Image: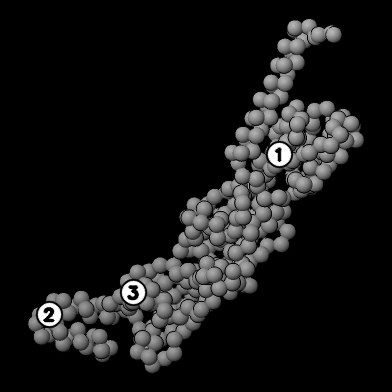
Amino acid sequence: MKYLPVNLLLFALAGVAFAQSRSAVVDQQLASVANLPAHKIEPNDLVALAVYDAPELTRTVRVGSDGLIDLPLLKEHIRAEGLLPTELEAKITAALKEERILIRPVVTVTIMEYHSRNVSVMGAVHRPVTFEVTGATRIMDALARAEGITNDAGPDLLLVPTGGATVEKINVNELISGTRPELNVVLEGGEEIRIPEARKIYVVGNVRKPGAIPVRDNSQATVLKLLAIVEGVAPYAANRAYILRTETATGQRHEIPIELKKILARKSPDVTLLPDDVLYIPDNTNKRDALETAKVLGGYGTSAFSALIYAGRL
């Protein structure tokens, strides 16, 4: 009976131990991460290959930029790009049989990392973020990662798929309210979620809190609604206000007068404003001068004079 030399025996045992240790490392990696959803494999994805009873073939492999993977003992590279994990399993199994490396190979492919499966959330959110898709991730999950939308968010969300093929517009109110659950679609990775800021109406002049008011939905923005938001007019507001409106096509600005006093007194219909309009409420110089004069008067005279001013007789 012939025996192997001691040095060759030790070398063989060391090789077996190394292969087993490699297998153990891969097994630990598989146990430490959840198997990601089965999407088609793309370049730079990281896959874990487990071949039953063949530790020398069990390893993690990064798909090359050319879409190929290189396995030991196999003469030819294997194209993984465009395959589902189960399809890659079948392809590796067939290659091992064809090259007579294993008679009945049992191959398992697990996705460790989808290099191209990131989702980006940007625009009118509290914290723009890019994250890797793991498990069943929906649009609302992505918005939660971005800590929600801001007060300046517009009425619609733009979902840009991988490659930017067809942009889908989703109503934010319907999405968040849950009235149309089909809008909360599952993200496969590679998408961009963009939340544009809402167009605004600007209220300036003699109001208590001038500012830009976002137009978030399709409801009409009117003079009375906007005055409620800016907490009403200031004491020296003129009776007539103006809407400054710019035509989109020509860029020409128009000045539209409105009878503010009559609207407030319900003697004239409320006026609708459009996004990008400027509601300007000028100063009533005569009223301001009259009130300043009233300050120097005392007692009954002040009250009576002020009453005349607010009644519109001065």
**Number of callouts:** 3
Name which residue lies at 54% across and 50% down.
129
Mark 3 is surrounded, within 10 Å at the Cα level, by few (under 14), some (14 to 19) or many (20 or more) other residues, namely few
Q: Nearer the viewer, residue 30 or 219?
A: 30
Residue 228 falls in image quadrant? bottom left
- What residue does disc 3 label? 231
Quadrant holding the N terminus: top right
Where residue 51 appears, as percent x and y from the top left, is 76, 35
Q: Nearer the viewer, residue 155 or 74?
A: 74
Name which residue lies at 82% across and 43% down.
90
Q: Residue furthest bottom?
A: 267
Q: Earlier in the sequence, mark 1 or mark 2?
A: 1
- Amino acid found under the numbered disc labelled 2: Leu
Which element type, helix, strand or loop, lies under badge 2?
loop
Where residue 141 appears, as percent x and y from the top left, is 55, 57
Quadrant holding the C terminus: bottom left
